[in-house]
Amino acid sequence: MSETENDSKNENEEESQEKKRKKFTFKCTRCDACCLERGPIPITLWDLEMWARNEVLANFLPYLEIYAQPSGSMDLILKPLSSKDKEQDQINQDPTKALQKTPLEELLNEKCPLYNKEQKKCLVYENRPLSCRTYPLEFDGKNFKIVDLDCPGIGEEGMTKEELKEMRETAKRMNYELTRIRIALPVLHQIISRNVMMDLMRQNIEAMSQMSEEDRKKLDEIFKKAQKEQPT
Ligand code: SF4
Ligand code: SF4
């Protein structure tokens, strides 16, 4: 595509975004297209609190991951499975697959791990994250923004004033909650990492104290050998 064509495509997209923003009307058609290619979903403290209150936190734990952005900030995300795992359909048999370290960039258009394709439904609808409740509307602190112009629900008639108000309030809450968790997460991460390290050290010391003299000597020899082999 030439540069001029590219510019005109961007202008059209901006115009389309502007038009839809000015006259925003929405009714979810439950086509589930968003669940099928949602990619990583940001999770907030609001979600964690709701899940804890409703005693369903354990259902989400296998899919939660802390993602450190290149800028240094951190997000808690609901991580999709990679296509490889999806093809093998291992999600229900082995949820720990969700912990595999596939780079996030490869997961941007992947199916939400909590969407069941065969039954065509969200497995956690009553407890779905805040981000799903406000989709496809977002608030960036100043403006509302439509994040998915292809969502067929946009432009659907029948949205009441109260529904619009509620959707805007949910988008604002999402923005507030994202800020809240981005402040809390690095602090919590440091505290938890430190505690995990301390526990590991404690366990090591305990294990060492229970070792026989002979085993301790063997371990010393292994350490000395490893040190000698280290490049200088
Ligand atoms: S939010 Fe949009 S894409 Fe998602 S299910 Fe509703 S209509 Fe479909
Ligand atoms: S949690 Fe439910 S509503 Fe949200 S993306 Fe996953 S399947 Fe869709």
Image: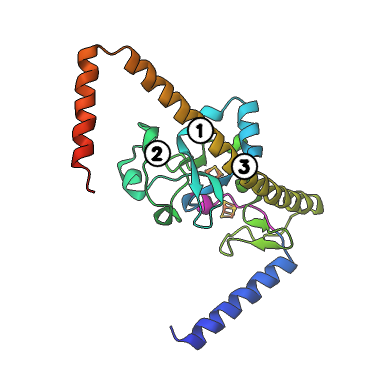
Q: Is residue 33 magenta?
A: yes
Read off the residue under disc 2.
Answer: 99
Residue at the image position 54 percent from the left and 48 percent from the top: 41
Horizontal arrangement in the rendering, residue 112 relative to residue 176 (left or right) = left
Q: Which residue is mark 3?
A: 44
Instruction: Decide: is 38 above or below 45.
Output: below
Give yes or no for contact between labels 2 and 1 (Cβ–Cβ under 8 Å): no
Q: Is residue 166 visible?
A: yes
Q: Between disc 1 and disc 3, whose residue precedes?
A: 3
| Magenta segment boundaries in residue numbering | 26-35
- Mark 1 is on which residue type? Arg
Q: Is residue 166 left or right of residue 221?
A: right
Per the image, the residue denoted by label 1 is 194
**Where residue 125 appears, x then y in whole percent?**
58, 38
Q: Residue at x 60, y 80 (%)?
A: 11
Question: Would the CB of label 3 be found within 8 Å of ligand 2?
Answer: no
Q: Earlier in the sequence, mark 2 or mark 1?
A: 2
